[in-house]
Image (spheres, rainbow, N blue to C red):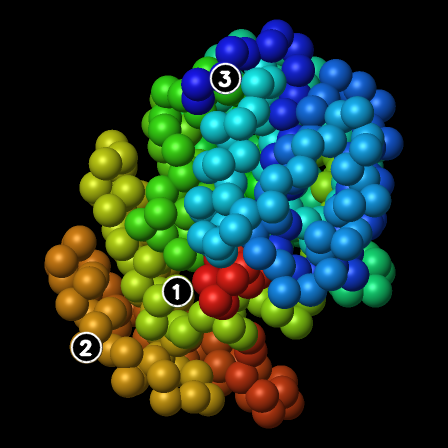
Amino acid sequence: MSVAMKPGLVSVVVTSYNHAGFLERRMDSLISQTYQDIEILVIDDCSTENNVEILRRYESHPKIQLLLRKQNGGVVSATNQGIEMSSGEFVIIAQCDDDCDPRMIERLVGALKSHPTAGIAFCRSQLVDQNDQVIGDDYSTRERSFRKRCTTDVVVRGAEMSRFLLHSCVIPNMSALLMRRDCLAAVGALSGAYAVCWDWELFFRVAARYDVSYVAEPLNRFRQHKNTIRSVTKNRVIYGEMFRLLLGQSKALDLTLIERCRFRTRIMFLWAVHLISPSWSGLKNFPYHASLVFRYDSLALLFLWLGLVLRATQVLGKLVLGRQRLPALPHPRARRSHTAGLR
């Protein structure tokens, strides 16, 4: 980050790529924040919808700076460019199809100022559909240990957060997250090595060095719509990145034998969901995924049989209850698309 830091300032980086129908709500929710010391940097990554037309209406706002990229580079590249342009003590990545409560930034800044050891702060999210109807929240779907730990505002130690992240991406999306500029400088930019799990990988790097502050109030609105990453990104890529990230991270953590066995069972169960599914993609991808698992943690393959048994038991239970369709993939996190179907 080459721009001089301004204490107290929050740099909001809006990564704009299509989803034009949600963009006005996104921008209005940022302009109306109760925390007024902000700059809003909008990076449009060559949208094919009328994003630019909408963004031009906001260009004269004193807090907004608009950059129109000449060539599409993807969400990681656009986000990193916005961060490089920023000058705030804090940074938030506001994705263009989400929106938020007017108090969100104020609450997250307060959480970081109250807890100096925390490198990031994030809040609970409401899940909303394309018609702005609330369809749930991210907290209720988390594992029991996370829900027990995060019933109220809390600081989660880095080592504990790393274990939560091994189970699933407990930080719902970047729009719910505020980062210290110094933290970003210390852990480095977003990695272009991941097309899907780029933010998840960043969270691991942060948790390795900092604590994480959690705000239990649902102040972010995380959009769920038909352009999910699972619908536009092949499972070969999704699972390949997941194995590379999670199995690689597990080696870096000081896990007990029981923790390691539980983790291996978990990741093999997720693989079994892909294998035992209505499509044949899991079986077609088996040699490739098996080679990745062997490369990063060969002993994890010994737990595949247990994952298959757990998945088969789950499917049979659903059928006994009269549900004829197989349950949906319990992916550690639903994701959405950005340029060329990868985000």
Specify the amino acid type for callout 1. Answer: Ile
Q: Earlier in the sequence, mark 3 or mark 2?
A: 3
Specify the amino acid type for callout 3. Answer: Val
Q: Which numbered dot is residue 238? A: 1
Q: Report the residue marked by disc 3.
A: 3
Q: Earlier in the sequence, mark 2 or mark 1?
A: 1
Q: Residue at x 61, y 40 (%)?
A: 67
- Tell which of 37 and 336 is nearer to you: 37
Check disc 2: other Cα within 10 Å, few if <14, some if 14-19, many if 20+. few
Q: Residue at x 81, y 33 (%)?
A: 60
- Tell which of 136 and 94 is nearer to you: 94
Q: Along the horizontal axis of the image, is 310 left or right of 16? A: left
Q: Are marks 3 and 1 in contact (CB under 8 Å)?
A: no
Q: Report the residue marked by disc 2.
A: 287
- Residue 155 visible from this viewpoint: no
- In three-dimensional space, the C-alpha distance between marks 3 and 2, rounded to whole angstroms, equals 47 Å
| Disc 1 element | helix
Q: Earlier in the sequence, mark 3 or mark 1?
A: 3
Q: Position of residue 45 (x, y in %)?
A: 56, 52
Q: Along the horizontal axis of the image, is 308 left or right of 303? A: right
Residue 277, by quadrant, is: bottom left
Check disc 1: other Cα within 10 Å, few if <14, some if 14-19, many if 20+. some
Q: Is residue 241 above or below residue 144?
A: below
Q: Along the horizontal axis of the image, is 318 left or right of 161? A: right
Looking at the rendered image, the disc whose residue lies closer to the viewer, 3 or 2, is 3
Q: Position of residue 323 (x, y in %)?
A: 62, 87
| Disc 3 element | loop
